[in-house]
């Protein structure tokens, strides 16, 4: 018998126990959910972090500055910001 590493599909690992999975959370989906929530809060929050980030990266509600100071939050928020604007009034 040959010994080696068993390769299992990630979707199978993330499936529920009833479907022979391990019920491990898919971190890609979790990360996207948190980034979408962060983009929503950025768009509709008046908190200090939101105000600071808006001043640093936005010219207007729909226009970004071409050059802005580095932010560790902005690339993730930017990924979903247009989606938030497209599906809300």
Image: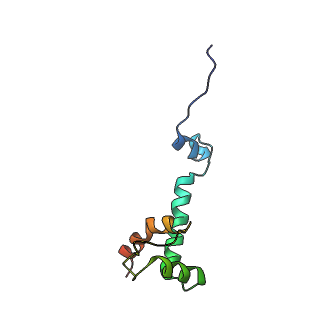
| Residue drawn where x is 45% and y is 68% of the image | 78
Number of marks in picture: 0
Nearest the eye: 32 or 61: 61
Residue 67 is drawn in which quadrant? bottom left
Front residue of 23 and 43: 43
| Residue at left offset 59%, top offset 42% | 21
Image quarter in which the N terminus is found: top right
| Residue 44, image x, y percentages | 49, 82
Q: Is residue 50 left or right of residue 63?
A: right
Q: Which residue extends farthest top?
A: 1
Left or right, residue 24 beside residue 29? right
Q: Nearer the viewer, residue 47 or 1?
A: 47
Q: Is residue 51 above or below residue 28?
A: below
In this rendering, is residue 1 above or below 14? Answer: above
Q: Where is residue 33 shown, x and y percent of the image? A: 52, 63
Residue 50, position as x, y percentages in the image: 55, 80
Question: At 52% across and 65% down in the image, what residue appears?
Answer: 35
For the point 37% across and 82% down, the residue is 89
- The percent position of residue 64, horizontal first and vertical second, equals 40, 75
Up the image or down, 48 lies above or below 24; here it is: below
The way the protein has been coloured in the rendering is rainbow
Viewer-nearest residue: 39 or 59: 59
Residue at the far bottom in the pictured view: 46
């Amino acid at each position: 018998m040959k010994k080696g590493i068993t390769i299992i599909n990630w979707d199978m690992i993330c499936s529920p126990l009833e479907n022979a999975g391990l019920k491990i959370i898919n971190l890609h989906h979790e990360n996207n959910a948190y980034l979408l929530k962060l983009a929503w809060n950025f768009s509709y929050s008046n908190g200090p972090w939101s105000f600071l980030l808006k001043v640093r990266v936005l010219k207007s509600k729909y226009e970004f500055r071409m050059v802005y100071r580095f932010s560790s939050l902005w690339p993730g928020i930017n990924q979903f910001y247009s989606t938030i604007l497209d599906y809300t009034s």
